Image (cartoon, rainbow, N blue to C red):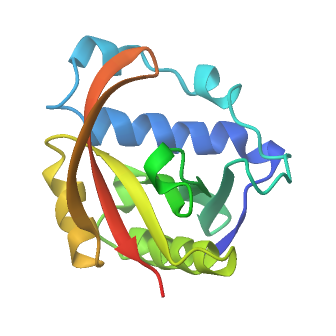
């Protein structure tokens, strides 16, 4: 298994993981018609894996046998009350690679990268009702803060809960 920064040529493979993860993981949380309509090609065009600005998101991919099977995206926290923290913006593993430790290794790498960037703490936003993700993050030291929000992601309204973790 190899974890490395995402490169522009990774965009479609990352988008495939992203879409398949949403379609499997959010099956009972988002409308099926919406999930069925998601296309990797649409998502791939939105990624920017070239930007080196430290204030912009940075994505890391995990490869197994030269195939991208997961990714994590990190950035400075976007919430006004958490500007001094890092943020885990996304962490997805292809469904056919779930429950093999890949997500845990990718999360550990994300924690290390956020700490290297100087953050003592990080936040993440999780889709409300995503009990699989809740168990995963709680197992790795993340705690719900009790804050929720409603936002539009990929043209759909979602409700999310904020989690927090000390990195150092």
Can residue 79 be seen?
A: no
In the displayed structure, 35 sits above or below 123; it is above
Which residue lies at the image location 22% right of the left edge and 77% below the top edge? 139
Given residues 108 and 116, the one toward you in this image is 116
Q: Can you name the residue that lies furthest to the bottom here?
A: 168
Given residues 77 and 97, the one toward you in this image is 77
Q: State the image coordinates of residue 66 (x, y, percent, origin top left).
A: 68, 64
For the N terminus, the image quarter is: bottom right
Q: Can you name the residue that lies furthest to the front here?
A: 81
Which residue lies at the image location 21% right of the left edge and 71% below the top edge? 138
Q: Using residue 147 as the reference point, say whether residue 11 is left or right of it.
A: right
Which residue lies at the image location 28% right of the left edge and 67% below the top edge? 137
Given residues 62 and 124, the one toward you in this image is 124
In the displayed structure, 130 sits above or below 144; it is above
Q: State the image coordinates of residue 16 (x, y, percent, origin top left).
A: 54, 38
Q: State the image coordinates of residue 133 (x, y, percent, origin top left).
A: 24, 56
Which residue lies at the image location 59% right of the left edge and 57% below the top edge? 74
Q: Quadrant of residue 118?
A: bottom right
Given residues 71 and 1, the one toward you in this image is 71
């Amino acid at each position: 298994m190899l974890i490395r920064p995402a490169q522009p040529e990774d965009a479609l493979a990352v988008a495939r993981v992203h879409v398949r993860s949403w379609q499997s993981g959010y099956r009972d949380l988002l409308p099926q018609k919406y999930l069925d309509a998601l296309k990797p090609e649409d998502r791939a065009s939105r990624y920017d894996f070239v930007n080196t600005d430290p204030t912009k998101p940075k994505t890391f991919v995990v490869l197994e046998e030269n195939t991208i099977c997961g990714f994590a995206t990190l950035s400075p926290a976007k919430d006004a009350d958490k500007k001094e923290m890092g943020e885990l913006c996304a962490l997805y593993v292809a469904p056919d690679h779930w429950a093999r430790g890949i997500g845990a290794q990718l999360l550990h790498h994300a924690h290390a990268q956020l700490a290297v960037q100087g953050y003592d703490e990080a936040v993440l936003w999780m889709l409300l009702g995503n009990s699989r993700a809740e168990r995963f993050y709680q197992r790795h030291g993340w705690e719900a803060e009790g804050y929720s929000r409603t936002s539009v992601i990929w043209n759909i309204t979602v409700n999310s809960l904020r989690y927090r973790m000390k990195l150092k």
